[in-house]
Image (cartoon, rainbow, N blue to C red):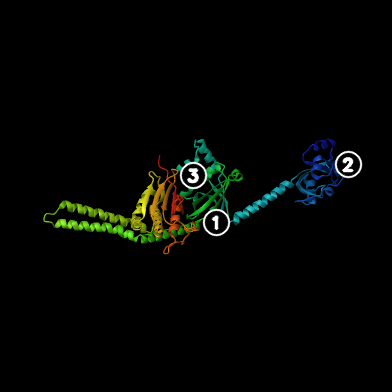
Amino acid sequence: MTPPITPAEAHVFERFHDAVFVRDMEGTIHFWNAASAALYGWPSHTALGANARALLKCEHHRDPHACADAKVLADGYWEGELSRLTETGSRRLVNVRWSLRRDAAGNPVGVLETGHDISSAKELERHLKASEYRYRNLFQAMAASFWELDFTAVGPKIRALLDAGVRDLEPYFLTHPEVVRDMMRSTRVLDLNDHSLRLFGRGNRAEMLGTVDRYWPDESIQVYARCVVKSLAGLPNNIEVTRLKTIDGTAFECLFTACFSKENLARGVILIGIIDLSELAAARHALEIMQTELAHVARISILGELSASIAHEIKQPLTSISTYAQAALRWLKRPQPDLQEIENALLQIIDEAQRTDDVIGRIRAMALRRPAEESDVAINEVVQDSLQFTDHELRKHSIRLTTELAGALPPVRADRVLLQQVIVNLVMNAAQAMASTASAPRELTLRSTSPDGQDVRFEVLDSGPGIAPGLEHKLFESFFTTKTTGMGMGLPICRSIIEAAGGLIQLENRDDGSSGAKVTITLPGLKRPV
């Protein structure tokens, strides 16, 4: 019988990196190269003459043995995956190719097999499938909206901008929102989870696929622009609060996250996550309303405490008006009316009426219930306005006031009336603390500075009994008070007002050798225009 392999062929096959062996039609191995010995562990002298199937314990993954044998006889070729037993008893998954060998008369004499180990590749594939399965499960199961976006069409647009000479994309996008909008129209939704259907759509997945442009209101397009800029800069993500639109056009507040992994960017894909903040925004709005109401109640309480000062402030101009009116009437009744004196009296009446109107205006501003309205505020002006409320109270308790207000302070960003409320509250607290003791002298110092030329610091220093040990941190707690008739809301509201303006308020005993308490307010100053 013609041998299934020639010596010349054996010499060539020995150089192959793939495992190569030749068996006759009964399965007896006639050639076994070094790569086969390395793959299966059986040396050549053991494999030669052995039956291939008996030696390797073959298990077909797709075609049964008989079918594979029939196919190689019919077609002269077969390829598939076989599970093979190695010399150590372990199994290897091998991708094999069988080629039928014939003699000169065309009769089949053997089969040439080449194979390579795909065990690691199959294991990796299995892990990838498992990972993909876990990812898809998480993608669908998370109580947040997840999207996969295809932005491959955006790349050429960015390259065109760079080729046109645009070097700093972020300011360019700010001045050319239409360019950003065009990029949005080129970004398409590849996939989205079920939560996205509930949050953005009407339950129809196909309806939501397509361009992302319809989900972005004009007010939020720079969020998309920053995603482009950050992805080009190699940053891992972009996270910010913004507003998006549902498919029917309803806008809502959300936390937006875009992830720029290198693997996804290489595929032209961005994964975004969206968390609905509508309920949080509603709760925040309710909290703001409650804070406004509490601040209003506190202001009314302060005005109640200042009722004597208010009455005094109004009584003075009213008394002057009465006096000047009587004088004018007397001068008018003279045989020869003194018109100049009458004119002077009437001018004084006008001035005092304006003064009364100013007092009422200040009281009305303090008493109104309204939301906070921030503006650029000069702290020294607010201090002077506040002292007009407290002047009578300080004189009533024989308190000597010293103001040390530094000039050229930077303005601060705050609500003027609320800041005035804070200062009046602190001055009244200091006055009442000093009035509760017999210590003398009673001295109150109001000081404004800017130690670093940027932040503004305002201090209230009194000569009262100071803060009792253990109460330093309790005084800012809601409803805690050391006054028999106090509400316990003055200082907590002061803190909320200052912190809302980005500042800090601190209360401590004086550390300059004098007795008494010190309140320090620090607010961020605004940069002056150059």
Residue behind mark 1: 197
List x then y, in percent, for residue 388: 33, 54
Question: Amino acid type of disc 1?
Answer: Leu
Quick check: can you spot residue 100? no
Question: Amino acid type of disc 3?
Answer: Val
Whether residue 291 sits left or right of residue 323 in the image: it is right
Image quadrant occupied by the C terminus: top left
CA–CA distance in space, label 2 to label 3: 78 Å
Residue behind mark 2: 1
Residue 442, picture quadrant: bottom left
Q: Residue at x 81, y 37 (%)?
A: 14
Q: Residue at x 85, y 36 (%)?
A: 7
Q: Secondary structure at mark 1?
A: helix
CA–CA distance in space, label 2 to label 1: 72 Å
* Mark 2 crowd level (few <14, some 14–19, many ≥20, 10 Å Cα): few
* Mark 3 crowd level (few <14, some 14–19, many ≥20, 10 Å Cα): many
List x then y, in percent, for residue 309: 33, 59
Image quadrant occupied by the N terminus: top right
Q: Nearer the viewer, residue 487 or 17?
A: 487
- Observer-side mark, 2 or 3, equals 3
Q: Nearer the viewer, residue 458 or 102?
A: 458
Residue behind mark 3: 180
Question: Amino acid type of disc 2?
Answer: Met
Quick check: can you spot residue 423? yes
- In the displayed image of the protein, which residue is found farthest to the right? 1
